Image (tube, rainbow, N blue to C red):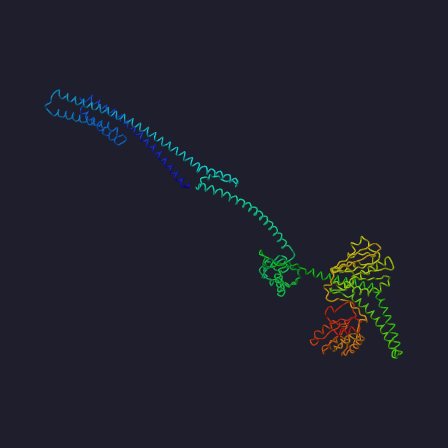
């Protein structure tokens, strides 16, 4: 039976029991009331009856009428009382006999009374009346009536007594039954209460107690309900559900604790994220670099204050727009193309961008751009950080120019230092040329050269050419060293570079008592660098070595050695001079630091040398020990894997010129040549050489006249001097290149300037230096 049904049954039973108890109490109360009323009524009737009978007996004779009336009243009252007794319907049937006897006696008395009355009436109405007999008869009738009344009174008293006893006995019996019923009902109530306590109250108390325990936080507590009878009522289900609720609550609490931890962790992460966001926002807003983010369509999603400052546009205007909002069309297209390449590559790139804003401002940005990915790893846009390096580039360019000027000045200073030695080196071959030229002149004047003495004349001519070649070599070395460098990086053979330098200084140093010893264990020592700067570095180190030797002795030795492996090439320059104090070694490469006496050094030589070596991705170091001397070691990356052709320094010597082969090359070409030089002798030499090779030659000393000739006629070659009055060779070539009919003309520049290399600027097709040889002209025309 389910608990709901049990509770309904208990509720109905209790109400029924209460109803029965109330009904019994009311019924007993009413019955006792009526029994007492009947007893009082019977006593009253009996007393009244006897009083009436006594009155009748005492006063019957005197007041017959009154007796009649009283009798009628008594009879009426008896009848009423009898009807009341009958209405009560509580007298048992076995008591009915006495009541019938009373009624029979009452009828008998009534009959006697009727006879007596009838007798009295006859006596009164009958004239004949017997004296004496009437009174006796009447007395007899009265006695009978009194006896009958007495008997009736006795029977009535017995009846009333028995009725009272019976009623009292019945009341006690009913009371006992009621008490028994109440006892049984109480027992049932006790049993019911025990059942209720066991089946409902105790489980409910356990549930209530468990609720309090669980409410205090002990979620491991279990409500223990007797399940031996496999109860399936609501309380058992409630206890089971309550335990399950506690388990779920524990899980929820555990989950809540975990959730609280996660929430706390997330709140901490959010706080940290907000802190980081605030930091990033502060950095992005406060940085001087433009920071921006674009979507895949090139529309701006982020635009910081620096970007606003550069472009002159507010972020509100730019967000959602592309680069056409900020830059000129060409610059915008270039930027967007670059962005697309970065997005396709998916990698971060750093480069320089030259842009012109819509307001006309020009900027050079050092930009870093990279793809922006979403949480799925998909590219969703591009970010960029642009630093304005316009002023830095300008300053860098100025710094490079100043550095170049400083290097060039250093070269000129070195040339000035070598001037005396170079002059001596040039004067010696000049003396030879001058002497042999005079001898040849005398022989020609005496016509000895025409008298069959051809061999002697040829010998003199060869000696003159060798001396001239020596001068050309010295001048060419000075030219290579002193010309302004254009930072051209090329693969150089370090062996040849050193040999070129030795050709320039070895003779001069030997005359000062300083010998140079050169050894190389690397047959092909290739490094990547600038030829002129590398020569300047080596010449500076050789000059310092010579000065260090001259401070302590008149003669000395400079040792140059080249070693290498697959990774590195090392060049060491050592001397046996005065050496460098150990305390100065750490500062030896600092600018304006020198160990020389005041006025004998600028303190820039080694600093410049260190800068040059570092620009070639190399390093320079020094070791020194007292008067033993110093050794400088230059280490460079091996560039043999970068070399496609070996770059060498060409030294012009007569032994290297095979005129016959060059003549064969020139014979394969021909054409019309215009020679422009303000030196008439140079014009003549060039004209004679070219006419030997069957070229049609025209000459002029005026560049303006040359320009007129060029406008009016076609030329296959134009050979012009670089420096001329009113118009330089460079300007002449630039003007000639504007003429459409000279589109296939080749231009050759000849100059004696040792400081500038205009061929590197792409003005002419060929570049020749004075003094030049026939072979040089032949090669220029042949190529």
Q: Nearer the viewer, residue 101 or 616?
A: 101
Residue 45, position as x, y percentages in the image: 25, 26
Q: Residue furthest left?
A: 128
Residue 78, by quadrant, is top left
Q: Residue furthest right?
A: 446
Judged left or right of residue 389, residue 94 is: left
Residue 592, position as x, y percentages in the image: 78, 57
Q: Residue furthest top?
A: 132
Residue 213, position as x, y percentages in the image: 51, 39
Judged left or right of residue 204, residue 406 is: right
Q: How many marks?
A: 0
Residue 441, position as x, y percentages in the image: 87, 76
Q: Nearer the viewer, residue 522 or 16?
A: 522
Residue 468, by quadrant, is bottom right
Give the quarter of the figure containing the C terminus.
bottom right
Q: Is residue 16 visible?
A: yes
Judged left or right of residue 556, residue 398 is: left
Up-down relation of residue 568 to residue 742 (above or below): above
Residue 111, by quadrant, is top left
Give the quarter of the figure containing the N terminus.
top left
Up-down relation of residue 641 to residue 179 (above or below): below
Q: Is residue 358 visible?
A: no
């Amino acid at each position: 039976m389910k608990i709901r049904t049990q509770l309904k049954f208990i509720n109905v039973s209790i109400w029924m029991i209460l109803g029965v108890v109330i009904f019994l109490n009311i019924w007993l109360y009413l019955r006792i009331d009526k029994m007492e009323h009947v007893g009082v009524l019977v006593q009253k009737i009996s007393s009244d009856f006897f009083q009436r009978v006594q009155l009748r007996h005492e006063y019957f004779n005197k007041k017959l009428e009154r007796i009649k009336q009283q009798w009628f009243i008594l009879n009426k009252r008896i009848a009423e009382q009898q009807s009341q007794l009958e209405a009560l319907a509580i007298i048992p049937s076995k008591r009915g006999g006495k009541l019938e006897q009373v009624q029979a006696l009452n009828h008998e008395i009534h009959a006697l009374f009727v006879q007596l009355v009838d007798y009295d009436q006859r006596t009164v109405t009958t004239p004949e009346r017997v004296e004496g007999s009437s009174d006796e008869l009447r007395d007899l009738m009265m006695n009978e009536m009194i006896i009958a009344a007495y008997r009736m009174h006795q029977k009535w008293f017995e009846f009333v007594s028995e009725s009272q006893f019976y009623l009292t006995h019945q009341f006690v019996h009913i009371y006992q039954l009621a008490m028994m019923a109440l006892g049984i009902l109480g027992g049932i109530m006790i049993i019911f209460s025990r059942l209720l306590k066991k089946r409902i109250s105790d489980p409910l108390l356990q549930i209530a107690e468990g609720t309090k325990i669980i409410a205090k936080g002990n979620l491991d507590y279990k409500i223990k309900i007797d399940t031996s009878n496999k109860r399936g009522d609501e309380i058992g289900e409630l206890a089971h559900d309550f335990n399950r609720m506690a388990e779920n609550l524990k899980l929820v609490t555990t989950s809540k604790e975990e959730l609280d931890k996660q929430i706390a962790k997330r709140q901490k992460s959010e706080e940290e994220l907000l802190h980081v966001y605030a930091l990033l926002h502060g950095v992005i807003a406060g940085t001087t670099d433009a920071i921006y983010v674009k979507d895949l369509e090139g529309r701006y999603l982020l635009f910081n204050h620096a970007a606003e400052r550069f472009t002159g546009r507010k972020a509100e205007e730019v967000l959602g727009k592309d680069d056409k909002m900020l830059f000129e069309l060409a610059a915008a297209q270039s930027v967007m193309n670059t962005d697309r390449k970065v997005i396709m590559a998916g990698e971060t790139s750093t480069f320089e961008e030259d842009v012109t804003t819509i307001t006309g401002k020009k900027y050079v940005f050092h930009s870093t751009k990279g793809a922006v990915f979403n949480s799925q790893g998909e590219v969703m846009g591009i970010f960029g950080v642009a630093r304005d390096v316009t002023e830095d580039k300008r300053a860098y360019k100025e710094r490079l120019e100043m550095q170049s000027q400083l290097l060039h000045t250093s070269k000129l200073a070195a040339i000035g230092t070598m001037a005396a030695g170079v002059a001596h080196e040039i004067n010696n071959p000049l003396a030879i040329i001058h002497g042999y030229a005079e001898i040849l002149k005398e022989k020609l004047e005496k016509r000895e050269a025409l008298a069959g003495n051809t061999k002697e004349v040829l010998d003199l001519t060869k000696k003159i050419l060798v001396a001239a070649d020596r001068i050309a070599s010295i001048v060419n070395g000075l030219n290579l060293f002193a010309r302004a460098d254009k930072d051209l990086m090329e693969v150089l053979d370090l062996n040849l570079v050193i040999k070129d330098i030795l050709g320039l200084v070895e003779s001069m140093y030997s005359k000062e008592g300083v010998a140079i010893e050169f050894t190389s264990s690397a047959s092909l020592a290739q490094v990547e660098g600038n030829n002129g700067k590398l020569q300047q570095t080596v010449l500076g180190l050789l000059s310092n070595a010579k000065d260090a030797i001259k401070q302590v002795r008149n003669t000395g030795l400079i040792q140059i050695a080249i070693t290498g492996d697959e990774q590195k090439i090392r060049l060491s320059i050592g001397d046996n001079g005065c050496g460098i104090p150990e305390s100065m070694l750490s500062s030896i490469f600092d600018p304006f630091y020198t160990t020389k006496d005041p006025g004998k050094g600028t303190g820039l030589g080694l600093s410049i040398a260190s800068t040059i070596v570092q620009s070639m991705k190399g390093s320079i170091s020094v070791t020194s020990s007292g008067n033993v001397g110093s050794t400088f070691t230059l280490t460079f990356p091996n560039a043999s894997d970068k070399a496609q052709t070996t770059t060498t320094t060409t030294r012009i010597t007569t032994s290297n010129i095979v005129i016959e082969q060059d003549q064969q090359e020139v014979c394969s070409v021909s054409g019309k040549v215009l020679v422009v030089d303000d030196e008439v002798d140079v014009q003549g030499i060039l004209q004679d050489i070219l006419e030997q090779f069957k070229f049609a030659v025209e000459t002029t000393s005026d560049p303006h006249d040359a320009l007129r000739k060029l406008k009016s006629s076609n030329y296959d070659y134009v050979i012009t001097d670089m420096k001329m009055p009113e118009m330089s060779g460079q300007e002449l070539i630039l003007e000639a290149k504007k003429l459409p009919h000279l589109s296939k003309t080749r231009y050759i520049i000849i100059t004696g300037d040792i400081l500038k290399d205009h061929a590197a600027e792409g003005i002419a097709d060929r570049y020749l230096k004075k003094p030049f040889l026939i072979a040089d002209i032949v090669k220029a025309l042949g190529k």
